[in-house]
Amino acid sequence: MLVFGTRPEAIKMAPLYYALKNCPDEFETLVCVTAQHRQMLDQVLQVFGITPDIDLNLMKAGQDLFDVTASVLTGMRDVLKEYKPAALLVHGDTTTTLASAMAGFYGGVPVGHVEAGLRTHDLHAPFPEELNRQVASKVTRWHFAPTAFSKQNLLNERVPEAHIEVTGNTVIDALLWVLDRIDTDEERKAALTQFLGARLPFDWQNRRFILITGHRRENFGNGFLQICEGLKELAYRYPAMHFVYPVHLNPNVQEPVNRLLAGLPNIHLVEPLDYEPFVFLLKHAHIVLTDSGGIQEEAPSLGKPVLVMRDVTERPEAVQAGTVRLVGADRDRIVSNVAELLDNPDSYKSMARAHNPYGDGKACERIINVLRNI
Ligand SMILES: CC(=O)N[C@H]1[C@@H](OP(=O)(O)OP(=O)(O)OC[C@H]2O[C@@H](n3ccc(=O)[nH]c3=O)[C@H](O)[C@@H]2O)O[C@H](CO)[C@@H](O)[C@@H]1O
């Protein structure tokens, strides 16, 4: 049984769902969604054509971390009692991950953790994700680590080596699958081009633009003010450059972004995009500014320089390779780093190298090989 509740988990679990479904003689595959983020999860389910077998539908207005944790935990208790899966597969580091892994542990169902071993070693950055993944690791039987670095983090925490498999990240499986679907289907490509064209009032296929996303809890408040101030300064300084920002639905993001950035002629605020148009846009972007985890993995595969608006990252591989740079949620550092990439072609070139430290698109195959032998 696969369980997930948010957009990034769904993107990263979708290829695994299909890989398991393709082996019906070996596995009976069930999907349970908690719908921790209803709308953004549903977008992904639709893109990948997944109909959940179980839907806890637990998102409520005004819920906090206590509410989500408690309702996933008790919801999953009942699901596990009813369906008695042989294994429960969780992903990454959301509250759904933490509470489902705990439910598996309490209920005696072995847990497989996809994207295991990412660490910043700072429980407050990202908050609460670092805690979520550390606790999930404690109760996990099969650790599917995306890189050798994440494996080493687990070994340092005394996870037995026999319980860890380096698989690559399933996000690369998802990315390559979606890109291939766009590239091989002219009608789909035309529809996407039209969809994006209706939302972006400039020639985004031929003009340079910077793609921005941001939603990390630790950036709420001052962090988002700094990010918006930095973007505003850049928009004034580079009037010919376009800035495309799909704005996360969280009110802590919507409020400052709309207040400070709406109405600027070269900043384009759009609703969060479905995965397919987002990937298509990413492929055309000149620079990416983000605090997201998944985009730090996807963008290097496409050769896009990424400036990460955080002080730490659990994904050091691309930072070490020089294609991702940490700039913090800091107005001046955001401005100076973007300016350097725009003004200095050598700097740009040195960051714009396509490489795949996070996987080769075969992560699901490796995960299934482990599950086959249980
Ligand atoms: C820093 C951190 O702790 N991040 C965690 C968070 O995800 P993460 O920070 O990646 O979450 P995001 O909400 O940024 O989602 C990223 C994904 O959404 C896509 N996208 C983005 C914008 C948009 O408008 N449309 C769209 O489809 C991106 O291509 C990417 O695949 O939960 C994931 C799932 O457990 C974990 O893997 C990550 O470690």
Image (tube, rainbow, N blue to C red):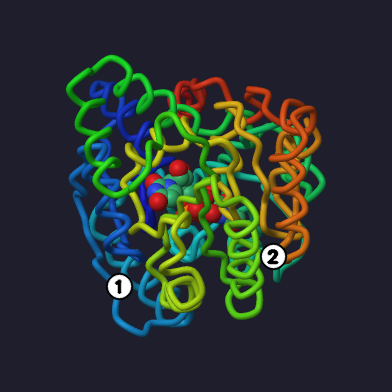
- State which quarter of the image contains the N terminus: top left
Name which residue type carries label 1.
Answer: Met
Looking at the image, is 7 positioned above or below residue 206? below
Circle 2 residue: 329
Residue at x 34%, y 47% (from the top left corner): 200
Pointer 2 or 1: first along the chain: 1
- In front of the other: 162 or 229: 229
Residue 6 visible in the picture:
yes
Name which residue type carries label 2.
Answer: Ala
Q: Judge from the rendering whether residue 123 lies leftward or rightward of residue 13; answer left or right.
A: right
Looking at the image, is 159 positioned above or below residue 309? above
Q: Residue 59 carries which label?
A: 1
Give the number of callouts: 2
Residue at x 66%, y 71% (from the top left corner): 226
Q: Please tell me in which quadrant of the rendered image residue 128 appears.
A: bottom right
Q: Position of residue 282 (x, y in %)?
A: 47, 37
Q: What element carries label 1?
A: loop
Q: Residues within 10 Å of mark 1 (few under 14, many from 20)?
A: some
- In front of the other: 9 or 270: 270
Looking at the image, is 370 positioned above or below residue 257? above
Q: Is mark 2 on a helix, strand or loop?
A: loop
